[in-house]
Image (tube, grey):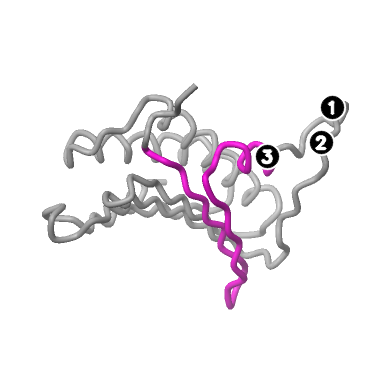
Amino acid sequence: MEPRLEGRTAHLADWPCIHAGFAHEGDSEAISAARRFAAGFLARVQGEHGVPVPVETVETAQLVVSELVTNTCKYAPGPGLLDLEVDVDTATLLVSVWDTSSTLPLARAAEPGRIGQHGLEIILALCEGYEVQRQPVGKRITVRISLEPRVS
């Protein structure tokens, strides 16, 4: 399963976004492949385009991608898509996941004794924004992650 890349920038001044897409079959191998894909994409963003990406942001992106793709593999039959886009002007990473299920995700109330099903809670805690859109087939979830270092 090789990722499909779509680089959209030749010069940052001409196009302020850097984009890559990854299609998967919805199997469990997609989860680790998506984490590697996200790390590789952010390394290219920094190395090839000179956009600073803090290590913490890479780790956050990998965790968010892992949780989103895990949900796709668990709850939606068939293939899925992962799109990553860096908006240079706003120093933001957009992570977008499409799957075939029309069922919208629901964040559950915190229950310390609950085992599992904390993915959406984690995503909401780590991201700057979260949006779900129904599609003609399935749904698309998009989250925003700041590329700026977090202030403690």
Question: In the orientation shown, which residue stands out farthest toward the front?
Answer: 151
Mark positioned earlier in the residue sequence (3 or 1):
1
Q: Which residue is identified by label 2?
A: 110
The CA span between labels 1 and 2 is 6 Å
Q: Residue at x 27, y 49 (%)?
A: 88
Please say whether residue 131 is one of the residues in the magenta stretch: yes
Please say whether residue 148 is one of the residues in the magenta stretch: no
Q: Position of residue 7 (x, y in %)?
A: 23, 54
The CA span between labels 3 and 2 is 11 Å
Q: Residue at x 80, y 45 (%)?
A: 108
* Left or right: residue 40 compared with residue 126: left
Q: Secondary structure at mark 1?
A: loop
Of the residues shown, which amino acid type is indicated by label 3? Gly
Residue 55 versus residue 30: which sits nearer the camera? Answer: 55
Residue stretch rendered in magenta on the structure? 120-147
Q: Do the residues bearing badges 3 and 2 touch, measured as CB atoms within 8 Å?
A: no
The nearer-to-camera label among 3 and 1 is 1
- Note whether 48 is above or below 113 in the view shown: below
Q: Quadrant of residue 151?
A: top left
Q: Looking at the rendered structure, which numbered label has been put on residue 119? A: 3
Q: Which residue is identified by label 1?
A: 112
Residues packed near mark 1 inside 10 Å, few (<14), some (14 to 19) or many (20 plus): few
Q: Secondary structure at mark 2?
A: loop
Q: Position of residue 135 (x, y in %)?
A: 58, 73
Q: Do the residues bearing badges 1 and 2 touch, measured as CB atoms within 8 Å?
A: yes
- Note whether 40 is above or below 85 in the view shown: above
Mark positioned earlier in the residue sequence (3 or 2):
2
Of the residues shown, which amino acid type is indicated by label 1? Pro
Of the residues shown, which amino acid type is indicated by label 2? Ala
Question: In the orientation shown, which residue stands out farthest toward the bottom?
Answer: 136
